[in-house]
Amino acid sequence: MRLDRATAALDPPFAVVDLDAYRANARDLLRRAGGRPIRLASKSIRCRALLERTLASDAGFRGTLAFTLPEALWLADNGLRDLLVAYPTADRAALRILADRPDDAGIALMVDDVAQLELIERAVAGSRTDPAGASNAAGGGGTGGGHAPPRPIRLCIDADAGWWPLGGRIRLGVKRSPLHTSEQVTALARAIVARPAFRLVGLMAYEAQIAGVGDRPPGRPLMGAALRTMQRLSARELAQRRAAIVAAVSAVAPLEFVNGGGTGSLELTRAEPAVTELAAGSGLYGPTLFDAYSRFSPLPAALFALPIVRRPGPGVATALGGGYLASGPVDRARLPRPLLPAGLRLDAREGAGEVQTPLLGAAADGLRVGDRVWMRHAKAGELCERFAELHLIEGDVIVETVPTYRGEGRTFL
Ligand SMILES: Cc1ncc(COP(=O)(O)O)c(C=O)c1O
């Protein structure tokens, strides 16, 4: 009722963020982080206004975990600082722009392989980052303007946080960094400090098998129990290994930060003394994949409305559009889910369609052409790739309408 009143003048499809729920979710993330700063995962927000305001809202949110270098450069151009790019980049043009900027805006790049160091070195050759070309680049084309010291590129090492029980015969976790042991991470740290184009500033290890896997899958209690056991054992192993990695790397270079965790693991990751900051984003929007956790329950804050345009028959109401599937492995959990009116479900054969989404259930008979339904996305920021703006709702009014990344003409991935 409240959402309908707030948006009565709008024609769906449109997307909203319920600020009351969003702020409650932010408070809950901070509570779960227990005083450890949270770096905001921008991929899970994809709206500059919300990113900036959340960072300004509480000192407990500190820095941005960006998802591409062009995004980090764009955020830096808009005044953000302390930007950690969470995934390795091979974007030579963006690297060159970073190297030629008068300041680096606190951007740090993610690496886990000497091949990435070599790629970056080639991309920035002759720029102000390159020790061989720095004075040229800073001299403004030979006008004798000065000899600015080379400015090394800030790097963060990504260490694998997966769990490898039975001597590595089983490997649980995501396929990201090849660096699992302390020795492997330290070897890359040494390779970085040996190269003048770089400065090692951070370490990251994201435990996706804990943070990104809901331990209370609906209707599957045995699976939930098995997941909770796996996650407990994995967290115990990781705490020891992460501490050893941080100690070993710190002996090679002093680290500014050690980042770990995500929305799904804040209270577990913050218990590790070796971790200086956490990361989170999805918990602010509260998408459906985060309904399946035992330790917390975010409120649905990001929603989209679709118009009912047809009634194919009893028990079915068909909405226009709605096929906003989430990335990841193919399963039903990636589909959007109807929220209101309560009692609607997707059709198993048609799912959420490119142009039409049939909605089934008793509530369908109460819907007429021109009514609206409220839906939730399975993931957080991906919703913003479908809409140019988010209507921000407080109580039962829209207080502001802000552009998404897409609405600003930016689609990074
Ligand atoms: C490196 C990294 N850190 C943290 C997160 C957690 O993000 P969220 O809180 O949105 O789940 C992710 C998500 O994929 C990630 O890739």
Image (cartoon, helix red, strand yellow):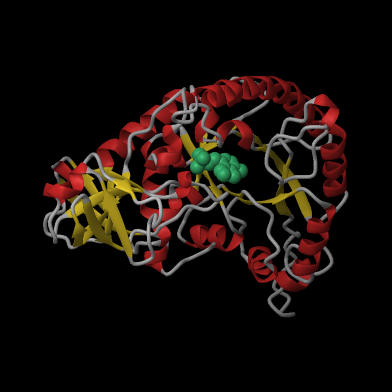
Q: Looking at the image, is 215 positioned above or below residue 348?
A: above
Q: Quadrant of ligand 1?
A: top right
Report the side of 25 relative to 120 (left or right).
left
Q: Is residue 233 visible?
A: yes
**Image quadrant containing the C terminus:** bottom right
Q: Looking at the image, is 353 positioned above or below residue 188?
A: below
Q: Looking at the image, is 200 positioned above or below residue 261?
A: below
Q: Residue furthest front?
A: 314
x%, y% of residue 85? 61, 51
Q: Is residue 390 visible?
A: no
x%, y% of residue 223? 56, 26
x%, y% of residue 284? 39, 39
> In this orientation, which residue lies closer to the viewer: 62 or 302?
302
> In this orientation, which residue lies closer to the viewer: 159 or 295?
295
x%, y% of residue 10? 16, 60
> In this orientation, which residue lies closer to the viewer: 297 or 143?
297
Residue shown at 73% from the left, 28% from the top? 242
Q: Looking at the image, is 176 positioned above or below residue 241?
A: below
